[in-house]
Amino acid sequence: MQRGGAVTCSEASAAIGHRPASADMRKRRRTSTAALREERDASGDPDGDRETSRPAEAAELHSPTTPSRGGVMSKAWRAARWLLLVYVCVPFVVKLCPSIQANLVFLNFVRSPFFLDLKRPSDVGLDHTLNFYLRPERTLSIGVWHTVPSDMRPEAEGKSQEWFESALSSAHPAILYLHGNTGTRGGDHRVELYKVLSSSGYHVLAFDYRGWGDSQGSPSEGGMTSDALFVYRWLKERRGGGPVVATNLVRRLCDGGSAPDALILESPFTNIREEARSHPFATLYRHLPGFDWFFLDAITANDIRFANDDNVNHISCPVLILHAEDDHVVPFHLGKQVRRRLRRGSPRVSSHAACGLSPQLYETAVRSPSLDAHKVQFVAFPSSLAYKHKFIYRSPRLPAILSDFLGARRPAEE
């Protein structure tokens, strides 16, 4: 037993003596590992700490700063809720604040090109154009451009307003151009149209209604008509009339017994409610219950109608309507009625598959008793030409169309 006990005691002694040896070995291992790491760092070995860095990388992958799929979905859901809230609020804001809808109709605050100085039409290539101002009311001035025919260009440069006014008495016809909403008389597509008309031998008078461009005042449908009537009378005093391009003005003139030589409508609509319903901006809300009450009635509340379809029933002068089939602002539809009208052989029409709001206006015009004795012509430009809403001036046929229309008063028999 003593032998066995001695063995047991020696084993215990050995076990007790093992601890310091094992601690020394671990210390030596750590020292050698640190030395090896320093040696690898000094040698620039990129793989030296690959194994030891894996736990850190794993911890980094699970770090709370890394976005998870749930976090992304939560942000997307919050954004969707905000968009839905805005979508729902817009109709109520428009209804409660009709002035917002009026601004959206007129868009007179939009200027393009933004940095154009309207006092310098030569900056856009109109060096035969005079900028001047008229006063429809004592406290109101509106900006006007007068572009003379291109064959008068050499003598027009640098001339005074008196010279330009006297030039209106020349044999060249004059067109009073009344632009639509958005922008100013210096808009790019409008300037290009002035150039085409000038090259075709026309005087062109273009102005900005009150509230547009550098004209004073605030916009309204009644104010626009008053401004147009004032400029027309100013023009008539100096040359005796001419073609114009707005049904509100022409109706006023015809009701007063002084009809203009002709009415030319470029991409017109039937009335503002139909146009607002068909406008691309209305796409998001067009099928919303109460669309008319929210949006269209707000327009009427501002006394904005632009009822071209009603005005043509009071017009007694030749009417020419120009429209592009791919117009995305005043879109083409309701074409079947016009095609039926064309088949009946009504007043002569130069057309390419005519259809749309302008054809609807055309159909109203040809049915109007006041236009029985006058030519009503509709010209549609096919989609393949890509004229859209603003670029009819690009048509090489436009000068001939105008010359043919203005040279005849009654429709030719088919």
Image: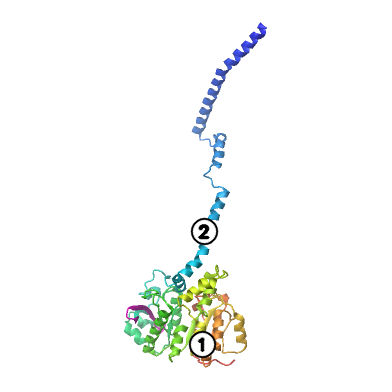
Q: Quadrant of the N terminus?
A: top right
Q: Nearer the viewer, residue 139 or 268?
A: 139
Disc 2 marks a residue whose amino acid type is Trp
Q: In this view, does 59 lie above or below 241?
A: above
Q: Which amino acid does label 1 sit on?
A: Asn
Q: Which quadrant is home to the C terminus?
A: bottom right
Name the residue rendered at 51%, 87% in the picture.
313
Residue located beneath label 1 in the image: 313
Circle 1 residues within 10 Å: few <14, some 14–19, many ≥20: some
Q: What stretch is highlighted in magenta?
A: 136-151
**Mark sitting earlier along the chain (1/2):** 2
Residue 103 falls in which quadrant of the image? bottom left
Decide whether the magenta segment is chiefly helix, strand or loop: strand
Q: Mark 2 points at which residue?
A: 82
Q: Is residue 79 above or below residue 100?
A: above
Q: Residue at x 48, y 86 (%)?
A: 263
Helix or strand or loop: what does disc 1 sit on? Answer: helix
Residue 180 location (% of width, % of height)? 46, 77
Question: Residue at the location (35% across, 85% down)?
Answer: 165
